[in-house]
Image (spheres, rainbow, N blue to C red):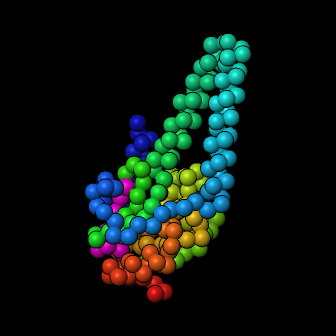
Amino acid sequence: MSWIKACRLPPATIPLDSLSLPALYEFKAPYDRPVKAITSALIAGLLTLIVGFSYLALSEREVAGFIALAIVIVIVIPTLIIAYLYSPRAFGITAKGILVKRPLKSFLIPYEDIASVKRVSWTWKGIRLFASGGLYGYFGLFQISGLGRAWMYVTNRDKMLLIETRRGIKYIISPSDPELFMEKLKSMGVEIEGL
């Protein structure tokens, strides 16, 4: 189960049950077209793979076919479920910090750790270190050209905000309305570049 540890919380965050700290303001994390296309295509392709292996296993009635089907199911189904459980569903502004809501392991970036927040543009110049590259969004640890390592929780590449902490940790999120999100953060005393 060491692969589950890789889905850990990002550094300098506070783990919490998403119900334990109510959001003063909540912003959804809607998918953009590429995320919708990648997610739909991957799910359809992986389910087609399962159907194909099922057909082969049932028509051939060989032990090897059933073993191959079992292996595919054991890999595909958990991959789809685990990726969804760690994907961003919404972003909240609470009394204590920025909440990244996920079905499993939501977390808080405390205001006292935030040095600045600003809008950023998408770039394909980077690599995934341990991350999803489009299935339910772009989330996890990335190495981005010109920015360095960043924890991304992005479902819409046109709505990205960069949060830099005093410890040098970078987060990129994509709330449904980034300008309003920044205004609400500014009212909480957070340093906002460009406002």
Determine whether, in the image, residue 80 is placed left or right of residue 45.
Answer: left
- Residue at the image point whose x is 46% and y is 87% from the top: 195
Query: Is residue 126 visible in this depiction of the protein?
Result: no
Residue 74 as seen in the image, left or right of residue 17: right
Looking at the picture, how far across and down is residue 151, in whole percent? 46, 62
* Residue 121 vs residue 19, the one in the foreground: 19
Instruction: State whether the magenta stretch is mostly helix, strand or loop.
Output: strand
Q: Residue, x 54% and y 61% (percent of image)? A: 30
Q: Quadrant of the N terminus?
A: top left
Count the marks. Answer: 0
**Which residue is pictured at 47% across the width and 57% down the height?**
88
Q: Quadrant of residue 67?
A: top right
Q: Please, is residue 15 above or below residue 179 in the view?
A: above
> Can residue 58 be seen in this snapshot?
yes
Instruction: Establish if 45 lies above or below 101.
Output: above
Q: Residue 176 location in percent, x, y?
A: 51, 68
Q: Is residue 157 magenta?
A: no
187 displayed left or right of 152 = left
Q: Nearer the viewer, residue 38 or 123?
A: 38
Query: What segment carries the magenta color?
Result: 106-115
In the image, 171: left or right of 127?
A: left
Viewer-nearest residue: 21 or 110: 21
**Residue 53: x percent and y percent?**
67, 26
Q: Is residue 99 above or below residue 115?
A: above
Q: Residue at x 62, y 24 (%)?
A: 69
Residue 113, magenta (yes or no): yes
